[in-house]
Image (spheres, rainbow, N blue to C red):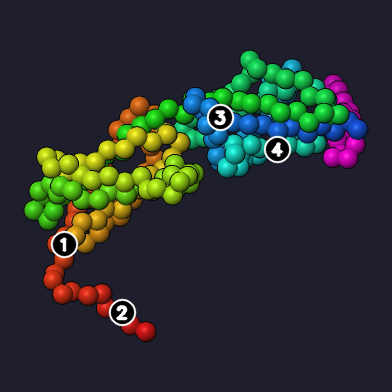
Amino acid sequence: QTASFTARLEKCLETAANCGKLEALVIDEDNLAVENAEVSVYNSETQLLAPVLPKTTDVNGIAKFANLKKGRYFLRAVKYPAEKKDSGNSFELDPKVLKKQTIRMEIGTGIVKIIVKDEENQPISNALVEFRTDSGKECPKENGEACSLETDAVEGKAEYAFKADKRVYAIISKEGYSSFTTSSRQVLKGQTLTLEAGLRKTIPGDKPDIRI
């Protein structure tokens, strides 16, 4: 014998009195906004996703939701490789009031190490290493300053600490050598990412061939 059930869902329109809005703020362990984090809303009673699509945080760490019915919810934030499901910090949504909710996730830091050598596999000292991030504002810094430093005299090494939600690459240059750009790699919490760069000596008087 087969039983049938009919479920009636009440549509929530943005202009309706039963429809609420939510503003989610994602911050890290240093209370800094987390950009490009994916935020999802869960129903606290059912532990299932609420019927709204996940949103991505803006440069201020904010994701905005609409079309949420009155109820109790919690947030989940993901910024690879970090994740936080904040089920222990649920909140009540009142359709008449804009709800602002903060979720804090631990991003952590990792070290990016660059080793620069010449064609004979010898370390190159005082080469300029300029770090860049694929997204976010960590490098260049907000004041426009680059995240850059010079390699040491022993190993041709330079190190920089980054938040572990970034993909990082470096541009290496030194007078008398051709410049080198590394591939972009993911920074992982508590780990050291080592990138190697090989610089070739330039030929005096050699100029790029530019054709118009």
Q: Is residue 92 magenta?
A: no
Location of the C terminus by quadrant is bottom left
- Identify which residue, 201 or 138, lies in the foreground: 138
Q: Of label 1 and label 4, which has the lower sequence position?
A: 4
Q: Of label 4 and label 2, which has the lower sequence position?
A: 4
Residue at x 84% of width, y 40% of height = 14
Q: CA distance from mark 1 to mark 2?
A: 20 Å
Q: Is residue 51 visible?
A: no
Circles 4 and 2: CB atoms closer than 8 Å: no
Image coordinates of residue 41 in percent, x first then y, are 69, 29
* 52, above or below 72, in the image: below
Q: CA distance from mark 1 to mark 4?
A: 51 Å
Q: In terms of image quadrants, where is residue 103?
A: top right
Q: Is residue 95 visible?
A: yes
Residue stretch in magenta: 1-16
Q: What is the three-letter code of the residue carrying label 1?
A: Gly
Q: Which residue is mark 2?
A: 210
Q: CA distance from mark 4 to mark 3?
A: 15 Å
Q: Which residue is mark 3?
A: 27
Q: Which residue is mark 1?
A: 176
Q: What is the three-letter code of the residue carrying label 4?
A: Lys
Circles 3 and 2: CB atoms closer than 8 Å: no
Circles 1 and 2: CB atoms closer than 8 Å: no
